[in-house]
Image (cartoon, rainbow, N blue to C red):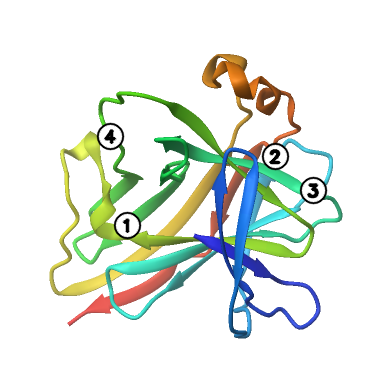
Amino acid sequence: MGYRATQQRKWYFGWATIIGLGVAALWGGATPYPKGQSTVSENNNSSGSLHLVLRQQLDTQRFAVDLLNVGLQPLILHVGIMLANGREQFPNHIKLRLAGSNKRILHLQMKVPSAVVGRLDPMVVPLPVGVAYTVPIDLRDYFDPTQHVWSVHLSKGDYSLQAEYAGTPVSRQAVNGDLQGIALMPYWTGHVQSETIRFAVR
């Protein structure tokens, strides 16, 4: 998971890990930022400020989702949960729609621990103007409980994949006592989908 700058020359600068409210960035090499489109339905005043781009990586099980702030104001995103004081991060508010050549459609969500012992915090991502936050996607980390598909294994065939993100506020009940201020932040709320990408397993 990490950040990309998307304004002007649109270079990739590195990755950052969100722990509580802190951002630790490790700056690296530069690569051009890819183009993409998304459909947005949001409740904020800044229409169309958040875009979602889905990209395929080197193999057919791995992808990346970019959350891009293309608006005029910084955004704050509630993307999932964190465990162990931020050492384990699960951006499970990003969901996937996978369709195969057999017309079967899976609505995939990220696997998270079924029981939590210890601290649980909301995963909050600040997103400045012109910056994207990248989440790596490995389909083997997703499942569809509604169809009792507990692990994704792709057989040979043609597939299509789409990502979606639903932005929600953080409630006071969801935060620990030392982080009550997180619930007061102006979170981006709404729904955004990526374009559908098609790929094949041969």
The amino acid marked with disc number 4 is: Pro
Q: Which mark is residue 98?
A: 1
The residue pinned by badge 4 equals 113
Q: Nearer the viewer, residue 120 or 185?
A: 120
Nearer to us of marks 4 and 1 is: 4
For image coordinates 63% across by 51% down, the residue present is 23
The residue pinned by badge 2 equals 188
* Sequence-first disc among 4 and 1: 1
* Sequence-first disc among 4 and 3: 3
Q: Position of residue 17 (x, y in %)?
A: 54, 54
| Res. 22 image quadrant | top right
Q: Which mark is residue 47?
A: 3
Nearer to us of marks 2 and 4 is: 4
- Asked if disc 3 and disc 2 are in contact, CB closer than 8 Å, the reply is no
Q: Secondary structure at mark 1?
A: strand
Nearer to us of marks 3 and 2 is: 2
